[in-house]
Image (cartoon, rainbow, N blue to C red):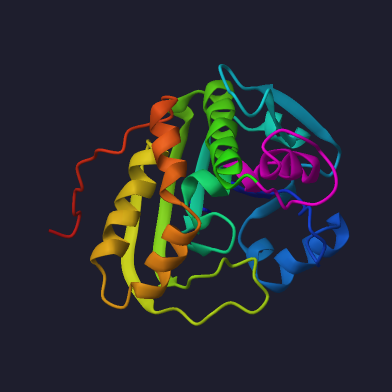
Amino acid sequence: MQSVGGTIVECNTAYGGSRASSALHKQVAADHGFTSFADFDLMDEEGEVQWPVTGGKRLEYAIVGSHAENYSDWLILSHFKGHAMAGFGGAIKNVAIGMSSPGGKVYVHSAGTRTSGSIMHSDQDAWLEAMAEMVTAVRDHVGEAHIVYINVMNRLSVDCDCDGNPAEPDIHDIGILASTDPVALDQACIDLVWQAEGNESLVRRIESRDGLHTLEYAAEIGLGSRTYNLVDLDA
């Protein structure tokens, strides 16, 4: 972060907890050491803005923290792991939920049906599709040449880091992947999970939530490609 002169950005959560208010969220960031090496910006602290979704069937726009307008270049750093609702969390989910304001988070989770209330939604595939559409809005607004995505594949639990009591990981350390294509990046991570020893619980989690539909739909709407060339920089 210091080498690129970057700012760590976040938005408050929509489900309570210590990251639901700006003051407590900043304290969490400080307690975990993030403010010791970079500036930390809660993008929704002063409101939210809408970035249009073109051609979406779930969303009309993305609702992001207003400070997102202050940044021209983005490095999306994600911990790839399982997730109780999405099946897995990688680059697409990190952008779709992480950049969304609390109201935007509800809007994505509810597949565009509301901006307040519960994040639970009865149509699983609809909310997976909404995540992909939200990321297209970010790409179109920022410009795809201004975004790089990095997925860290270590300590891969079936549960997300947002879970207060996550299951211990069965897959410990695969590596770090990067791409300018979030679909290719997440697909490569999925493929590596499918090849990994001890993957049974994470594969079950992803399949039980129809998690691969996120990538299927993201490719369908042109967010990226599920085909890729995996280049090993250590080779």
Residue 49: image location, x then y, percent? 77, 28
At a point 50% along the width and 23% down the height, the residue shown is 143
At a point 59% along the width and 24% down the height, the residue shown is 57
Above or below residue 39? Residue 103 is above
Outermost bottom residue: 168
How many numbered circles are shown?
0
Above or below residue 44? Residue 63 is above
Outermost front residue: 122
Q: Is residue 152 magenta?
A: no
Asked if one can make out residue 5 in the rendered structure from this viewpoint, the answer is no
> For the magenta stretch, what is the residue range?
96-122
Q: Is residue 226 left or right of residue 58?
A: left
Residue 103: image location, x then y, percent? 80, 41
At a point 65% along the width and 42% down the height, the residue shown is 99
Asked if one can make out residue 66 in the rendered structure from this viewpoint, the answer is yes
Looking at the rendering, which quadrant does residue 28 occupy?
bottom right
In the depicted view, which residue is nearer to us: 218 or 125? Answer: 125
Look at the image and tell me in which quarter the C terminus lies.
bottom left
Residue 97: image location, x then y, percent? 64, 46
